[in-house]
Amino acid sequence: MTRRQTPLPPDPMIRSLVRSQQASRRMSRRHLMVGAGAAGLLGALTACGTGGTTTTDDGPAEDLSEETMELFWANWSLYLDYDGDSGSYPTLDRFQEETGIGVTYAEDIDGNESYYGTIQNQLRQGQNFGQDLITFTDWMAGRIIAAGQVRELDHGNIPHLENLLPGLQDVGFDPERRHSITWQSGMTGLAWNREAVPDGVHTVTDLLTNPDLRGRVVVLDEWRDTMSLIMLDQGADITSFDAADFESALEVLEEGISSGQIRQVRGNAYMEDLVSGDALAVMGWSGDITQLNLEEGDRWDFALPEAGGTLWSDNLLIPNGAEHKSNAERLMNFYLDPEIAAEVAAYVNFVCPVQGAQEAMEAIDPELAEDPLIFPTEEMQENLHIIRGMDTDEEAEFTDMFQAVIGN
């Protein structure tokens, strides 16, 4: 069954709090929380993620999978199929029953940087910090892969790897998927209120210049998404863009803000602006729009800009200090099975990265099987791009430039 949520409270702040537990996995998925709430979460993550003592200075930790049939997995909140009646994860239960591997599953990850901050010392020293599998977004996955902090996969244990969508089988931050597999994906594109904007929004130029949208546009405060869409609109290749491309796109963003065309630059709270009507058109994430249409009525359309949108993914990785590598690879392989992937997709509503899952979804929910925000068409897939990797200095420089323009 497809998950359906109950209506959320009208107060925006209360809605945000409820959403973190109920429907807004994106609140934690795509935007680091700030203020006292983030401090509390950081403390909690520190308590549960930094207790490792097994050093592996001489190489990766010994694989104890055969001796101890267990596995520890850290993931994002509301990012695995969940049965509220039984308080269980059906597909994870099935994996445990079929393999005899006991899995300790923790929704410990609230942000890439915040979670990385709790484990970075152990990662650098190759220590076991209590997790055999961690789930990071492309850019953070690329960072720890480049640093040599995760284990190379034995593809012989992951025969279903061939089920990954073609565009995800060989990515810049991890050629030939030697260290990671895709968990779930999402698209960044344009969304609009279909009643208020009946002709739609088809280009970033339209979004940032259409006078009918003046003051009713919101763009994302995740610069990789906003700047990628602008650079693509300008004809740049985001798989190889340079500083000049970035600066040119930054000028467009600055003009959109100073002219009043852009109402705000926001994180997941842009969804509140769509619901209230303060925003008529936005740069947004596909999974959000799918969920909003389920929660609030089918009121919004989502499309990739004509110049292209971005594809981002969260990835499963095995840290060097992990002590159950083979067990982790068996779980990776399990979730690359189309039928299992379809069950997960029916709950999380993000882009499913597994070929064959769309056909399997027809037996679960035929409507979702036809949803292009979960199963993008071939045309959409051809119009999706993955932003190139960056070293930490370049990443910091671009971040500072972006923050200076948006006023943070």
Image (tube, rainbow, N blue to C red):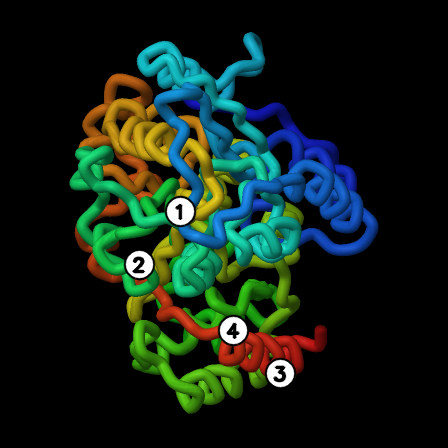
* SS of the residue under disc 4: helix
In front here: 28 or 44? 44
Q: Earlier in the sequence, mark 2 or mark 4?
A: 2
Q: Are marks 4 and 1 in contact (CB under 8 Å)?
A: no
In front here: 296 or 223? 223
Mark 3 vs mark 1, CA separation in Å: 39 Å
Q: Is residue 189 visible?
A: no
Mark 3 vs mark 4, CA separation in Å: 32 Å
**Residue 16 versus residue 64 in the image, above or below:** below
Amino acid type at image mark 1: Asn
Q: In the picture, which quadrant includes the C terminus?
A: bottom right
x%, y% of residue 53?
A: 61, 41
Q: Earlier in the sequence, mark 2 or mark 1?
A: 2
In front here: 400 or 329? 329
Residue 315 marker:
1
The residue sitting at the front extreme is: 58
Q: Which residue is mark 4?
A: 392
Q: Which residue is mark 3?
A: 259
- Please indicate whether residue 127 sits to the left or right of residue 144 in the image: right
Residue at point 38%, 34% (across, down): 63
**Residue 97 versus residue 314 in the image, above or below:** above
**Residue 87 versus residue 347 in the image, above or below:** above
Mark 2 vs mark 3, CA separation in Å: 40 Å
Q: Earlier in the sequence, mark 3 or mark 1?
A: 3
Amino acid type at image mark 4: Thr
* SS of the residue under disc 1: strand
When asked about the image quadrant of residue 170, the answer is bottom left
Q: Are marks 2 and 1 in contact (CB under 8 Å)?
A: yes
Mark 4 vs mark 1, CA separation in Å: 19 Å
Q: Is residue 378 visible?
A: yes
